[in-house]
Image: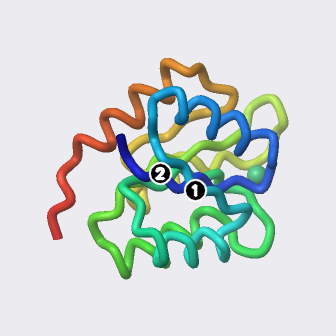
Amino acid sequence: MAKILVVDDEAQVRGMLVKMLSVEHHEVIEAENGTQGCKKYRKHRPDLLITDLVMPEKNGIDMILELKKEFPAIRIVAISGGGGITGSFDYLPIAKLVGALHILQKPFTLQALKSAVAEALEVPEVH
Ligand SMILES: [Mg+2]
């Protein structure tokens, strides 16, 4: 069991993640944008951060950059709708560049999430 912070501006996506992660007996904390995400990360010090990238107030990339400075060993899994069908810019490769261990394109399967989370949690927190 791990403590996981889920950051996404869509309540529906957060709800789905909470459901998926609770089945795995993880403790889940939610935030709806990068500003809240930074605050909650500092307060709760979760084992893993799962974050959306396109969000109002503070986007996922800015949040990752900010937290990575304070917590260099932070474990991150980035999720995003990305480009392709919607034609919007794909931020997932950038998330990887700035330190996400795994990236998941929405929509993803429970299995894909489970293995990304399991693999990310295996990375030792070496400072
Ligand atoms: Mg979003």
Contact, mark 2 vs mark 1 (Cβ under 8 Å)? yes
> In which quadrant of the rendered image does the C terminus lie?
bottom left
> In which quadrant of the rendered image does the N terminus lie?
top left
State the image coordinates of residue 103 (x, y, percent, origin top left). Answer: 49, 40
State the image coordinates of residue 93 (x, y, percent, origin top left). Answer: 51, 47
Secondary element at image label 2: strand
Q: Is residue 70 above or below residue 122?
A: below
**Badge 2 local density, few (<14 within 10 Å), some, or many (20+)?**
many
Kindly identify the amino acid type of the residue bearing the numbered disc 2: Ile
Q: Residue at x 75, y 61 (%)?
A: 55
Secondary element at image label 1: strand
Q: Is residue 15 above or below residue 64?
A: above
State the image coordinates of residue 7 (x, y, percent, origin top left). Answer: 63, 56
Q: Nearer the viewer, residue 32 or 58?
A: 32
**Badge 1 local density, few (<14 within 10 Å), some, or many (20+)?**
some
Q: Earlier in the sequence, mark 2 or mark 1?
A: 2
The span from disc 2 to disc 1 (Cα, nearest Å) is 6 Å
Q: Which residue is mark 1?
A: 29
Q: Relative to residue 21, is residue 48 drawn left or right? A: left
Q: Nearer the viewer, residue 107 or 41?
A: 41
Q: Is residue 39 above or below residue 90?
A: below
Q: Residue at x 40, y 68 (%)?
A: 45
State the image coordinates of residue 21 (x, y, percent, origin top left). Answer: 53, 35
| Ligand 1 under 8 Å from disc 1 Cβ | no
Q: Residue at x 63, y 40 (%)?
A: 18
Q: Residue at x 58, y 29 (%)?
A: 20
Q: Relative to residue 30, is residue 99 drawn left or right? A: left
Q: Which residue is mark 2?
A: 4
